[in-house]
Image (cartoon, grey):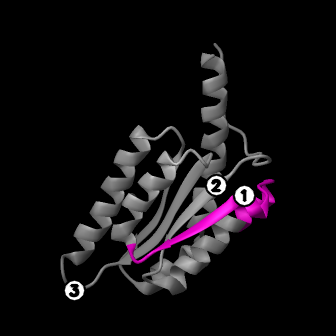
Amino acid sequence: MREIRGGLDGKGKRFAIVASRFNELVTERLVAGARGCFVQHGVDEGAIDLIWVPGAWEIPPAVRRVARSGRYDGVVAVGCVIRGETPHFDYVAGGAANGLAAIALEADIPVVFGVLTTDTPDQALARAGGKSGNKGWDAALAALEMADLYGKLERDRA
């Protein structure tokens, strides 16, 4: 049996981070985690583009444009939707998740979901560099691995 796995070497690769400004206290930390992961794994600082959008609802259309641009080896979407007292949370969180899932299935590059959906601000902060780690870092790690895997699969096809 032949086994194919992606690696974590980002040297020579280019990535985009699409981040929501809403809940910026949290998303800035997710961005820092993603950026730190990319740099630690060999991605040149100048090969990382940070694209800000107003909120989580706007993330999928921006990611779609990024994925279709042909400029990147992968894209990480980060945002934070915190449950409130109305069903707004369900629509925004579901729209972001479903939109990104649809793009990920059609894109030629990895599209990684790093959007937090939490019940409280404390839960969000715990996942943005607190006691539960940094989900921005985790999303970037997945993007690195998947970008390498996509490259291997493409070369194998040729």
Residue 23 place in picture, x, y as percent? 45, 83
Q: Which residue is drawn at 28% across and 62% down?
A: 94
Of the residues under marks 2 and 1, which one precedes in the sequence?
2
Label 1 sits on residue: 47
Q: In this view, does 11 lie to the left or right of 17?
A: right
The quadrant of the picture occupied by the C terminus is: top right
Residue placed farthest to the left in the image? Answer: 87
Asked whether 62 falls inside the magenta stretch, the response is no
The answer to whether 66 is drawn above or below residue 150 in the figure is below
User: Disc number at residue 85?
Assistant: 3
Q: What stretch is highlighted in magenta?
A: 36-55
Labels 3 and 1: the sequence-earlier one: 1
Q: Name the residue under label 2.
A: 15
For marks 2 and 3, the one nearer the N-term is 2
Q: Position of residue 70 (x, y in %)?
A: 56, 44
Q: Is mark 3 on a helix, strand or loop?
A: loop
What residue is at 71 percent from the left and 61 percent from the top? Answer: 37
